[in-house]
Image (cartoon, rainbow, N blue to C red):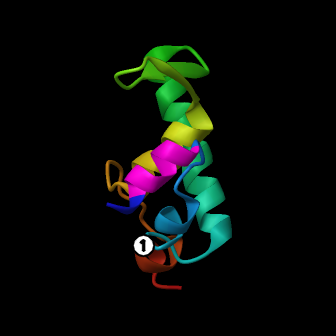
Amino acid sequence: METKRYEESGRPPIEEALKKVSTKYELVHAAAQRVKQLLKEQGEFIVIEGKKGELKKLTFKAIEDIANDRVKVISLKKLFGA
């Protein structure tokens, strides 16, 4: 799986996430919205995940969620037909 490679490198799966949106700007907006959601749920900017208990910033987690289809990004063009 593509995301596994990113987990090992410590980088967010940006290329995979870009496949889920129309533009890189839409990815930035969607990731920012996801970070806001996660902050409301957790109240912390860093999460602990994985078997090793590694720390991840919410920005990384947001992009990872988009890349792995844990959240659905709806394009404004699709929503409003623009």
The range drawn in magenta is 3-9
Decide whether the magenta segment is chiefly helix, strand or loop: helix
11 vs 31, nearest the viewer? 11
11 vs 59, nearest the viewer? 11
Residue 6 magenta: yes
71 vs 77, nearest the viewer? 71
Which element carries disc 1, helix, strand or loop?
helix
Q: Residue at x 57, y 60 (%)?
A: 14
* Above or below, 73 relative to 63: below
Residue 34 seen by the camera: no
Q: Residue at x 54, y 67 (%)?
A: 15
Where the C terminus falls, by quadrant?
Answer: bottom right
Residue 79 magenta: no
Residue 31 in percent (x, y) is at 57, 49
* Above or below, 37 relative to 75: above
Residue 25 lies left or right of residue 2; in this view the side is right
Residue 11 in percent (x, y) is at 60, 48
Residue found at the far bottom of this picture: 82
* Residue identified by numbered label 1: 79
Give the residue type that dot 1 points to: Leu
Count of marks overlaid on the render: 1
* Above or below, 59 relative to 11: above
Residue 76 in percent (x, y) is at 51, 71
Q: Residues within 10 Å of mark 1 (few under 14, many from 20)?
A: few
Q: Residue at x 44, y 17 (%)?
A: 53
Q: Which residue is drawn at 47% across and 44% down?
A: 7
Residue 20 in percent (x, y) is at 43, 69
The quarter of the picture where residue 57 lies is: top right
Where the N terminus falls, by quadrant?
Answer: bottom left
